Image (cartoon, rainbow, N blue to C red):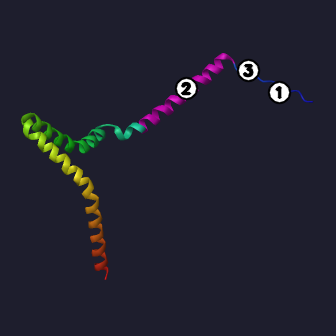
Amino acid sequence: MSPSPLKIKPSARQRRDALLAECALQRTALGVQTQLLLEPLSGGNLRHTIMARVKKPLLVGAAVLGLMLLRPRRSLPLLLKASRLLRHAKVALPVIRSVLQRMDRQRAHHLAK
């Protein structure tokens, strides 16, 4: 039997230095990953993206709210009619879309001849 190699136990100072170096590496890696995640949201990109998507709905909402505040007796029936129209549009739009797709297919078929 050969003697087992002696294991040298690192001192407390060596363990502390190793842990501090590992923590520094982790902080650096975390900083880089955070920057990569936040890059698309930085600066004016986020504001520009949000405002481009929200601008029209906000304008419509402000117009409806203004109407309701100025003429509440007239705006309630108008809102009820608009909600009915939207309900009918939800049903009609898929039908209209399928008819238009069918017409496009027929037009493409006739042009191919």
Q: Main secondary structure of the magenta part?
A: helix
Which x, y percent locates residue 51?
24, 41
Q: Nearer the viewer, residue 100 or 55?
A: 100
Q: Tell me, for residue 94, which label it has, or none.
A: none
Which three-letter amino acid code belongs to the residue tagged 3? Answer: Lys
Answer yes or no: do the residues labelled 2 and 3 have beta carbons within 8 Å? no
Label 2 packing within 10 angstroms: few (<14), some (14-19), many (20+): few
Query: Which image quadrant for residue 61?
Result: top left
Q: Does 27 appear above or below 111?
A: above
Dot 2 amino acid type: Cys
Q: Which residue is tagged 2?
A: 23
The residue pinned by badge 3 equals: 9
First in sequence: mark 2 or mark 1? 1
Residue furthest to the right:
1
Residue 16 appears at what percent x and percent y?
Answer: 61, 19
Is residue 13 or residue 53 the one in the foreground?
Answer: 53
Relative vertical location of residue 11 with respect to residue 79 in this rendering, above or below: above
Report the magenta residues as a range: 11-36
| 108 lies left or right of 82 | right
Could you tell me which residue is drawn at 27 percent across and 71 percent down?
103
Q: Residue furthest top?
A: 12
Residue at image position (26%, 53%) is 90
In percent of the image, x 28 and y 62: which residue is there? 95
Circle 2: element type? helix
Mark before the other along the chain sequence, 2 or 3: 3
Identify the amino acid type marked 1.
Pro
In the rendered structure, does residue 5 fall within the stretch colored magenta?
no
Label annotation for residue 5: 1
Crowding at label 1, few (<14), some or many (≥20) Cα neighbours within 10 Å? few
- 3D distance between C-alphas at marks 1 and 3: 12 Å
- Quarter placement of the C terminus: bottom left
